[in-house]
């Protein structure tokens, strides 16, 4: 490996680590073609009064709805369901401490039921947000 290639690996690793260090507040990301998902660190404090939540916005006009599942420490902590282009939030996350994270999953729904892909699995998109 050349010195330039080694430097590129170090820069790429540092960029990834810093991106995971703190998700920008109120920044929407793709939750699949049917939705967008946002981390909202309402009060950026590292104690029990911190108000952390995750929002989902349904894509308007597609005839589907979007359901959000939010996990902390491997456990489902809250869900939210958005319809007709509206937003909904998962607010029961508690205080996500600095350095902590939540995992989210956005799933496509139709007529009150999950939509399944060609492999028989729910059609979902997922990611993580970092405090």
Image (spheres, rainbow, N blue to C red):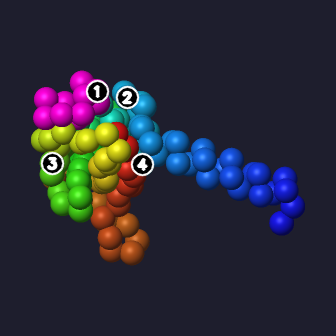
Residue at left offset 53%, top offset 48% = 17
Per the image, the residue denoted by label 2 is 25
Residue at left offset 83%, top offset 66% = 1
Per the image, the residue denoted by label 1 is 44
Check whether the beta carbons of the residues at disc 3 and disc 1 lie within 8 A of each other. Answer: no
Check whether the beta carbons of the residues at disc 3 and disc 2 lie within 8 A of each other. Answer: no
- Report if residue 9 lies within the magenta region: no
Label 3 or label 4, whichever lies nearer to me, is 3
Check whether the beta carbons of the residues at disc 1 and disc 2 lie within 8 A of each other. Answer: yes
Label ID, residue 78 = 3
Where does residue 18 sit, x and y in percent of width and height? 52, 42
Label 1 or label 4, whichever lies nearer to me, is 1
Question: Looking at this view, is 57 or 79 the one in front?
Answer: 79
Q: Quote the CA–CA distance across marks 4 and 2.
A: 20 Å
* Boundaries of the magenta span: 41-52
Is residue 90 in view from this perspective?
no
Label 4 or label 2, whichever lies nearer to me, is 2
Rendering quarter of residue 117: bottom left
Q: Earlier in the sequence, mark 1 or mark 4?
A: 4
Is residue 70 in view from this perspective?
yes
Mark 2 is surrounded, within 10 Å at the Cα level, by few (under 14), some (14 to 19) or many (20 or more) other residues, namely: some
In the rendered image, the vertical position of residue 77 relative to residue 54, given as above or below: below
């Amino acid at each position: 490996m050349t010195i330039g290639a080694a430097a590129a690996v170090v820069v790429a690793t540092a960029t990834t680590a810093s991106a995971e260090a703190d998700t920008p507040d109120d920044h929407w990301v793709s939750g699949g073609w049917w939705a967008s998902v946002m981390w909202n660190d309402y009060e950026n404090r590292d104690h029990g009064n911190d108000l952390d939540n995750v929002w989902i916005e349904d894509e308007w006009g597609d005839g589907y709805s979007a359901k959000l599942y939010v996990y902390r420490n491997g456990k489902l902590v809250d869900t939210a369901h958005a319809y007709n282009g509206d937003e909904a939030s998962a607010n029961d996350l508690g205080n996500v401490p600095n350095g902590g994270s939540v995992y989210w999953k956005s799933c496509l729904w139709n007529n009150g039921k999950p939509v399944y892909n060609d492999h028989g699995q729910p059609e979902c998109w997922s990611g993580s947000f970092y405090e």
